[in-house]
Image (cartoon, grey):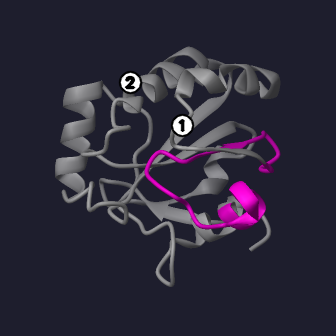
Amino acid sequence: MTSIYSFSARTLGGEEVSLEQYSGKVLLIVNTASECGFTPQYAGLQKLYETYAARGLAVLGFPCNQFGKQEPGDAAQIGSFCEKNYGVTFPMFDKVDVNGANAHPLFRYLTGEAPGVLGLEAIKWNFTKFLIDREGNVVKRYAPLTKPEAITEDIEKLL
């Protein structure tokens, strides 16, 4: 697959969604977890979504249980947690692996397009973020420590 729009993923509600529906939007794709020290970043991600959705930003959350088993819940539990604790209204997808043999093809693509530090493709932890431009190009990868508000300037340049 040669484009981000070639991939699809299942939502927390069980619906298979083609990323083609996000064509023409700026995307921020994030692997998330409910029991992580970075979990409060949900609030910042939601704020970005609320601030920029009307201008063409979509935030896409992909829960992952590969790091410290910090996303143990099922789809219903994850959705309830995100809505209740952080008011998340941006699209959340079903739990995926982001590294290894069972990594979701989207994350294999993202990590290949935007390797991390020292050229390593593997995602180190929850809340790694990938910024995608309106043409579907992976523009930048952000470490888990990078707070969503620190990405504002980069998002504005693409909108």
Query: Can residue 64 be seen from the camera position used here?
Result: yes
Q: Residues within 10 Å of mark 1 (few under 14, many from 20)?
A: many
Where is residue 129? Give x, y as percent.
Answer: 58, 44
Q: Circle 2 — which element?
A: helix
Q: Residue 153 lies in magenta, yes or no? A: no
Of residues 81 and 118, which is closer to you in this image?
118
Q: Is residue 107 above or below residue 101?
A: above
Q: Characterize the magenta stretch by its predominant secondary structure.
A: loop
Residue shown at the point (24%, 56%) measured from the top left: 75
The residue that label 1 is drawn on is 59
Q: Earlier in the sequence, mark 1 or mark 2?
A: 2
Q: Which residue is mark 2?
A: 43
Q: Which region of the structure is painted magenta?
A: 111-138
Q: In the rendered view, does 39 fall on the left or right side of 26?
A: left
As drawn, the residue found furthest toward the bottom would be 101
The residue located at (35%, 61%) in the rendering is: 95
Q: Is residue 89 visible?
A: no
Question: For mark 2, does the 10 Å Cα neighbourhood hold few (<14), some (14 to 19), or many (20 or more) residues?
Answer: some
Q: Residue at position x 27%, y 36% from top?
A: 82
Q: Is residue 68 above or below residue 46?
A: below
Quadrant of the snapshot with the N terminus = bottom right
| 18 shown above or below 35 | below
Q: Position of residue 77 (x, y in %)?
A: 17, 49
Badge 1 marks a residue whose secondary structure is strand
Residue 3 quadrant: bottom right
- Which percent across, then down, holds residue 113? 77, 61
Membership of 129 in magenta stretch: yes
Tell me the kind of residue under disc 2. Answer: Ala
Q: Where is 84 relative to 108, above or below?
A: above
